């Protein structure tokens, strides 16, 4: 009986964990590439572009974007990310990471503008 109880709890924990993943996180995590473009300070001129095709990097960035809600700051942006699936852009996301008090991601989902916190780990990753 003890083994059945442990097995049940393990299955329940996995089920709860998988259900907690948001639709936006699932959409980003299923993409096959990610392009990150960095802007020149105080400008929207692109100075650097980075492309990732590794699932670990894509899932990690998806987890950062799908963070807790933040205020919609008006600080300008340091760049943008675009998740791609089959060569088609799925979700463009603006980000601000240079100003610690203003770090956030900004994107549109279900017709609504959403802003989420960009934490120190995400800033370091970028």
Image: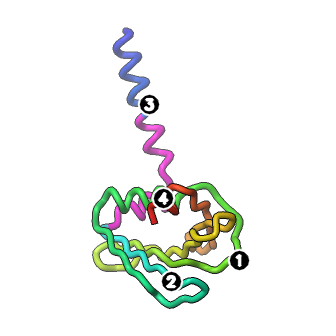
Q: Nearer the viewer, residue 107 or 98?
A: 98
Tell me the number on the disc at residue 23. Answer: 4
* Residue 23 in picture, x, y percent from top left: 48, 58
Structural distance between the alpha carbons of marks 4 and 3: 20 Å
Structural distance between the alpha carbons of marks 2 and 4: 29 Å
Residue at left 61%, top 62%?
A: 116
Asked if labels 3 and 4 touch by Cβ distance under 8 angstroms, the answer is no
Sequence-first tag of 4 and 3: 3
Structural distance between the alpha carbons of marks 3 and 1: 42 Å
Confirm whether the magenta stretch covers residue 27: yes
Query: Dot 4, crowdedness within 10 Å: few (<14), some or many (≥20)?
Result: few
* Mark 2: secondary structure: strand
* Mark 3: secondary structure: helix
Q: How many marks?
A: 4
Sequence-first tag of 1 and 4: 4
Q: Quadrant of residue 62?
A: bottom left
Residue at left 55%, top 57%?
A: 120
Query: Dot 1, crowdedness within 10 Å: few (<14), some or many (≥20)?
Result: few
Structural distance between the alpha carbons of marks 3 and 2: 45 Å
Residue at left 36%, top 16%?
A: 4
Structural distance between the alpha carbons of marks 1 and 2: 16 Å
Q: In this image, 4 relative to 65: left or right?
A: left
Magenta span of residues: 14-31
On the image, numbered disc 3 is attached to which residue?
12
On the image, numbered disc 2 is attached to which residue?
39
* Mark 1: secondary structure: loop
User: Relative to residue 125, is residue 19 depicted above or below?
Assistant: above
Quarter holding the N terminus is top left
Query: Dot 2, crowdedness within 10 Å: few (<14), some or many (≥20)?
Result: some
């Amino acid at each position: 009986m003890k083994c059945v109880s442990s097995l049940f709890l393990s299955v329940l924990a996995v089920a709860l964990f998988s259900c907690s993943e948001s639709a936006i996180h699932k959409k980003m995590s299923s993409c096959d590439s990610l392009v990150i473009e960095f802007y020149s300070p105080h400008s929207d001129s692109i100075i650097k572009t980075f492309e990732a095709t590794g699932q670990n990097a894509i899932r990690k960035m998806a987890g950062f974007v799908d963070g807790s809600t933040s205020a919609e700051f008006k600080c300008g942006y340091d760049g943008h990310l675009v998740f791609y699936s089959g060569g088609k852009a799925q979700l463009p996301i603006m980000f601000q990471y240079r100003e610690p008090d203003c770090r956030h991601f900004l994107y549109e989902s279900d017709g609504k503008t959403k802003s989420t916190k960009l934490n120190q780990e995400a800033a370091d990753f970028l």
